[in-house]
Image: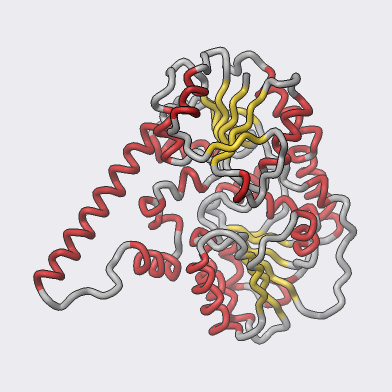
Amino acid sequence: MNYHLMIDDKFIDDFIDDAEKVSSKNSNRYFIRGNRQNAIHVKHLKAEWVEDIWSNDFKAILNKITSSDKIFIHWYSLDVGKLMLTIDKNIPIYVICWGGDFYEDPYLYHINWIHDKLTLKYVRKKYIFPKKWAKRPNIFLKQLLTLLKNKRSIHEDFLLKKKTVQRINFMLIDPNLFHEIELIRKIYDAPKISQLPFGYNQNFDRAIKLKKYKKNNDFLNIQIGNSATGANNHMDCIKVLKKFKKEKIKLIIPLSYGRPDYAEVVKKYCTQVFNNKFEALEKFMPREEYLKKLNEIDVAIMFHNRSQALGNCITLLTLGKKLYLKNKNPLYQFFKTIGVDIFDIKTIKNLTFEEFSKPLSEEQTQSNIEKISNLFSEEKRLEYLSNILNNKNNL
């Protein structure tokens, strides 16, 4: 039996459909953290909802799992990791690599390399330092002691997370994302984690069916990031694009999930720099509607230092859009490895607007689609998944 512990996310319904296609009947159970009444994304009839993974009822289910079964974790939070430390060590644990569960959990431990200068300043002010330093010595001292205590607590959480990551047997991720696996192994001192090829439905088959968008204006639509999280480094990206503010552009900024307070900061900063030349996407869109929105994009900039927004990137490239990534981002190395035409964010500061906005040629677009198809088509996705779910062991 395959046991899946999951979160309420847009990828999950498609994954369950895929798993049911390649598996024998009743060989998978899908446990979603939360409750059905508050579900936002998961609607699948096979989903079983678990409000408390530490409840006696759920522990009773875990206690029935044997070494001949498999546990699959979709979002490896610290809380889930602690739970995995309580089960039989011979039960194999498979973790789908999402990124944020390894680089932003515990959140404050990783902030210095996840964020760029402007975003880091905001995060420190918001989550670490007091709103205002006291002038009275005794209160100031208490603030310092609290700061040190919190810092120690964050480090302790990381050490515990490190222990839970070392419990993982297999990491499921695209086979060409070896830079990602090496980074996780290094951060958590977990060299024994094995890698298996895997991919969620990243919209390739849906995107390839969309007709090329016909522009009805002369504005350049520029997408920045994919969510209202600091890892997008929106303000730092906007600062880089400031030199183009007099051009006919419109910034498209997806902010439909993440931290609402951070979204407000991004909108305020964008207004200061670009006035009304931006559109914030604050309401969650059904997948088909969101793909149509992405089809209106001309240039996309993902200002992340870590892997994030792979689904957005795959969709945008399939739709023939120009994509800029940081060369330190493992996704940049991934796309370069498979021969996809993408562009380095570092070059933007030296580019004219014409160079920055120049679209991909038809040859570049078709080449990108061919290479992405080899990895992200439904056929390849199901091939990977069948191997993982149906093999008795993957050693």
Can residue 257 be seen? yes
Of 327 and 220, nearer the camera is 220
**Residue furthest left in the image:** 138
Image spot of residue 331 (x, y percent): 60, 48
Viewport quadrant of the C terminus:
top right
**Whole-percent x and y of residue 378?**
80, 37
Q: Which one is nearer the viewer's eye here, 358 or 372? A: 372
Residue 319 higher or lower than 64, as above or below: below
Please tell me which residue is depicted at 81% across the width and 48% down the height of the picture: 369
Residue at figure coordinates x 41%, y 29% from the top left: 166
Q: Residue 82 at what x, y percent from top left?
A: 39, 33
The answer to which quarter of the image holds residue 148 is bottom left
**Quadrant where the N terminus lies?**
top right
Which residue occupies 62% across, 23% down?
A: 2
| Residue 352, above or below 18 | below
Name the residue at 81% across, 33% down. 379
Q: Work out whether residue 344 can be spotted.
A: no
Q: Is residue 78 left or right of residue 379?
A: left
Callout count:
0
Question: In the rendered view, does 193 fall on the left or right side of 111?
Answer: right
Judge whether 244 appears above or below 201 on screen. Answer: below
Query: How has the structure been colored for display?
Result: secondary structure
